[in-house]
Image: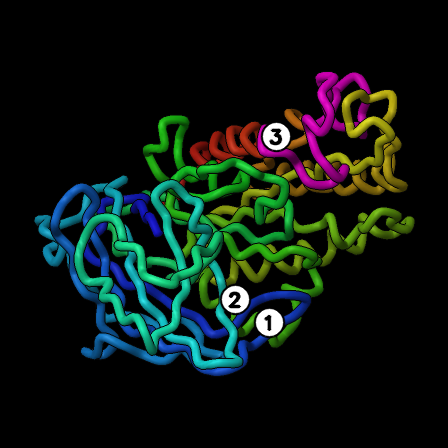
């Protein structure tokens, strides 16, 4: 899996977890053993093995939170005081799963250069220590998704660098983005925004989204013990929740209740030391009789039409920006919505150009959203 640092990093650690967020916290069945983990410096023959309290292996068990490797200094990869911002590293990992256990997949191997597969360990025991492309393992099956660290946490040589966490549902998770191969930071408008148009100048980011979640899932007291510790590493949160609070037919109090819940989340971010909150405006939501080829054949979902609950909530965000409750507001509808036909997706006559389901943006629109978000992120100042 490829990694790029968002600042000059003097040292770093990899963190692993034994939980996932679905409609509540889910713990995996059975332990998973990290047999070997290493980090490779791209384009060189330099790599370093990672250890856990001095051991090359560790078991990730259900409920583990931020199981960390030992600290890896810049010098271990042949650098001086620090690893320069934007340097491409590769994590190389071999894990063992007993029969009946779960693999918490979190790595998209279609990221450019990424690779994942599974095989029978009783017949194959390849080492990952080395550099360059993995050698094909006899009998392996290639995966579109695989396993890797939840995140790399680096120590910046100087202050002022952005460290961003996204909290949201399938919209910010990247559903609908079919870009293949992906760029080095992954798919979806949040991950695309982590690099510029040349795949450079990276912003450190962690996407804590989960399909189908609403504010209630993240405010749950048990869930908070799992996800809020990651706020300690962030100075910016991108908050995108709200779509699943509304559904396709929100009642007359949906905007007010969702806004109240979001304010509670914003208080959690601030209490954890997050300096800036970047909020996105809710996207269009509609049906279509011509696969969203035209505005005329779209039917806006109840509550999502002009003057409805979506517009009320988006208006609340503007008020929050003025009061300082949030620090930036990303106008996704400004590039996703037909400005001449409010509430409808922007079209160009081609089927499925903006969306394939009326809720999630297409790959093209994820790209447009990435530009909006990156501009907002680069516009905030952190210490």
Above-or-below relation of 187 to 274 = above
Q: Are marks 2 and 1 in contact (CB under 8 Å)?
A: yes
Q: Position of residue 15 (x, y in %)?
A: 36, 66
Residue sitting at x 55%, y 68%: 20
Residue corresponding to mark 2: 227
Looking at the rendered structure, the secondary structure element under dot 1 is helix
Q: Which residues are magenta?
A: 337-364
Q: Quadrant location of residue 359?
A: top right
**How many residues crowd around disc 1 within 10 Å: few (fewer than 14), some, or many (20 or more)?**
some
Residue corresponding to mark 3: 365
Looking at the rendered structure, the secondary structure element under dot 3 is helix
Residue corresponding to mark 1: 223
Secondary structure, magenta segment, majority class = loop
Of the numbered discs 2 and 3, the one sitting upstream in the chain is 2
Residue 357 painted magenta: yes
Which one is nearer the viewer's eye here, 366 or 122?
122
State which mark lies toward you, 2 or 3: 3
Residue 1 painted magenta: no
């Amino acid at each position: 899996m490829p990694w790029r640092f968002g600042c000059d990093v003097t040292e770093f650690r990899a963190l692993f977890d034994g939980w996932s967020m679905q409609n509540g916290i889910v713990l995996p069945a059975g332990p998973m053993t990290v047999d070997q983990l290493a980090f490779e410096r791209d384009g060189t023959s330099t790599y370093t093995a990672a250890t856990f309290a001095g051991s090359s292996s560790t078991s990730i068990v259900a409920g583990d939170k931020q199981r960390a490797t030992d600290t890896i200094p810049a010098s271990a990869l042949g650098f001086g005081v620090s690893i320069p911002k934007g340097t491409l590293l590769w994590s190389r990992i071999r894990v063992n799963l007993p029969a009946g256990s779960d693999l918490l997949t979190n790595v998209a191997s279609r990221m450019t250069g990424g690779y994942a597969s599974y095989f029978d360990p009783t017949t194959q025991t390849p080492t990952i220590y080395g550099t360059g492309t993995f050698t094909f393992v006899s009998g392996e099956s290639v995966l579109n998704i695989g396993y890797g660290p939840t995140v790399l946490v680096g120590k910046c040589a100087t202050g002022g660098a952005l460290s961003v966490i996204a909290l949201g549902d399938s919209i910010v998770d990247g559903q609908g983005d079919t870009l293949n191969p992906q760029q080095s930071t992954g798919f979806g408008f949040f991950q695309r925004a982590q690099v510029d148009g040349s795949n450079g100048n990276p912003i450190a980011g962690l996407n804590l989204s989960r399909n189908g979640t609403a504010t209630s899932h993240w405010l749950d007291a048990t869930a908070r013990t799992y996800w809020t510790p990651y706020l300690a590493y962030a100075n910016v949160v991108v908050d995108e929740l709200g779509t699943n609070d509304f559904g396709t037919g929100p009642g007359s109090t949906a905007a007010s209740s969702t806004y109240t819940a979001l304010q509670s989340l914003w208080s959690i971010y601030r209490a954890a030391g997050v300096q800036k909150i970047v909020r996105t405006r809710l996207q269009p939501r509609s049906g279509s009789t011509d696969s969203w080829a035209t505005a005329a054949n779209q039917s806006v979902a109840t509550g999502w039409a002009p003057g409805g609950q979506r517009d009320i909530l988006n208006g609340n965000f503007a008020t929050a920006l003025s009061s300082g409750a949030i620090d930036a507001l990303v106008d996704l509808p400004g590039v996703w919505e037909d400005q001449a036909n409010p509430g409808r997706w922007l079209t160009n006559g081609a089927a499925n150009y903006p969306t394939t389901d009326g809720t999630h943006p297409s790959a093209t629109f994820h790209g447009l959203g990435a530009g909006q978000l990156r501009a907002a992120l680069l516009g905030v100042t952190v210490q």
